Image (cartoon, rainbow, N blue to C red):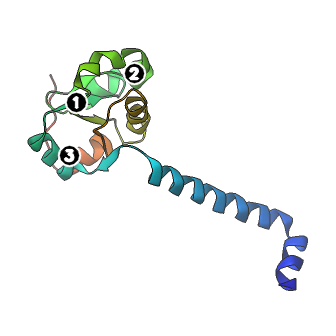
Amino acid sequence: MDQYLEFVANHPLLFGLLAAVVGAIGYTEYTRLTRKYKMLGPADVVRAMNQDQNVVVDVREEAEARKTGKISGARHIPLTKFKDRVTEISKFKDKTVIVYCQTGARSGQACNTLVKNGFEKVINLQGGVLAWESAGLPLSKK
């Protein structure tokens, strides 16, 4: 034990960095375990789309959606306007809401907003449109 204390005393910067990394990992795992929405890959999202009544929401910016297209039937509500426009889909609180963006990161923010607004069945497309395309699934340019 004395060697550990001596190491910490001699290398406070290294110990501080170790503590920061352990803290970051702990925070990431805590948020993953306590999130109130599901993270599903493209194949599982297609299954959910086929099984339940649902609404699909694209939260990418307008230019991104035009460039690559969107999942057929998806409603486009950019993340920058999502909090103001969440009322547009509030009538679907009893349905499954599938949210996606380009990579799956921004859509997590939208999923948190939906959960805070009383939506219970919320799914984030893990990997976003990039994963959707990689799986060979179609996108609509309309």
- Check whether the beta carbons of the residues at disc 2 and disc 3 lie within 8 A of each other: no
Q: How many marks?
A: 3
Q: Which residue is mark 2?
A: 82
Q: Residue at x 40, y 25 (%)?
A: 79
Q: Amino acid at mark 1?
A: Asp
Q: Residue at x 51, y 57 (%)?
A: 29
Res. 126 in view: no
List x then y, in percent, for residue 53: 13, 34
- State the residue in front, 73 or 121: 121
Estimate the spatial distance between the alpha carbons at disc 2 and disc 3, rounded to whole Å.
21 Å
User: Which image quadrant is residue 95 in?
Assistant: top left
Q: Which residue is mark 3?
A: 45
Q: Secondary structure at mark 1?
A: loop
Estimate the spatial distance between the alpha carbons at disc 1 and disc 3, rounded to whole Å.
17 Å
Q: Residue at x 14, y 27 (%)?
A: 73
Q: Amino acid at mark 3?
A: Val
Q: Mark 1 or mark 3, which has the lower sequence index?
A: 3
- State the residue in front, 9 or 97: 97
Q: Mark 2 or mark 3, which has the lower sequence index?
A: 3
Binning the other alpha carbons within 10 Å of mark 2 as few (below 14), some (14 to 19) or many (20 upward) gives some
Q: Secondary structure at mark 2?
A: helix
Q: Residue at x 70, y 57 (%)?
A: 20
Binning the other alpha carbons within 10 Å of mark 1 as few (below 14), some (14 to 19) or many (20 upward) gives few
Q: Is residue 134 above or below residue 89?
A: below
